[in-house]
Amino acid sequence: NTLETIRMMALSNGDRQVSNTVSLFGKSLHYVLENTISTKASIEKELKHIVTYLQIQKLRFDERFDYCITQPPELNTSAYQILPLLLQPLVENAIVHGIEEIDHKCMIQINLSLKDEENLVIDVIDDGMGMSDEALNQLNEHLLSDKSESHSSIALSNIAQRIRLFYGEGYYLKIMHHKPSGTHVQLSIPLIPYE
């Protein structure tokens, strides 16, 4: 309600950008609060949250990046579940560590694909700065050992651990190079009906 009051004040003062930003922030905050203690959200809702997050970041970075989300036509995202707030840290890392320091326009891709009838793969790819082989290997080692040293590796370690604890050892989060530049984060989860 407080955010809506601020949004209406901005709108009445003719500041559409502030009004739109507050509206997007309110949506994002609502999703986070709604799912803080939940173990499931529909994939559709998680993707809508990611779009809201990306729209907020586009306001911050102006036209420095674009994004696209692809999914197979046969995947009904409202019919399957995902751990809530699983994707935002991956997209956030793509922005903060991948494109924040780049001065040309970048792209963030979020691609959903069916591994088979029971498994989903989600790829978050940026064409930003990327990382050295050493940093990449060290980060993947941290994901396997559940030890982390930096803020970004803590977030990634938490995601990797949540995937293993909730879905099982056969599912994963891994990080790869994206050629010619950038980072490719891939996660594998089972397709679980959303009830």
Image (cartoon, helix red, strand yellow):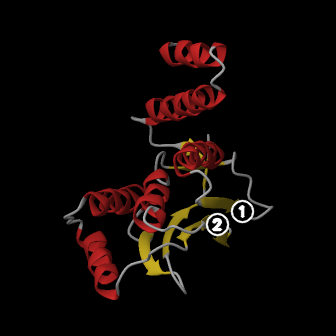
- Look at the numbered discs 2 and 1 and tell me whether their residues touch, using CB distance below 8 Å: yes
Q: Specify the amino acid type for callout 1.
A: Gln
Q: Tag 2's secondary structure? A: strand
Give residue 39's position: percent from left, percent from top. Answer: 45, 42
Q: Specify the amino acid type for callout 2.
A: Asn
User: Image point 66% across, 20% down: which residue?
Assistant: 14
Instruction: Tell me how far mark 2 sits from mark 1, CA to CA.
Output: 6 Å
Image-based side of 147 in relation to 152, left or right: left
Name the residue carrying label 2.
111
Q: Where is the C terminus found, in terms of image quarters?
A: top right
Give residue 159's position: percent from left, percent from top. Answer: 38, 58
Image-based side of 99 in relation to 140, left or right: right
Image-based side of 162 in relation to 183, left or right: left
Q: Is residue 140 above or below residue 163?
A: below
Q: Which of the numbered marks, if any, corresponds to residue 71?
A: 1
User: Image point 46% across, 35% down: which residue?
Assistant: 32
User: Image point 69% across, 45% down: which residue?
Assistant: 78
Q: Is residue 48 above or below residue 106?
A: above
Query: Which sits in the foreground, 15 or 186?
Result: 15
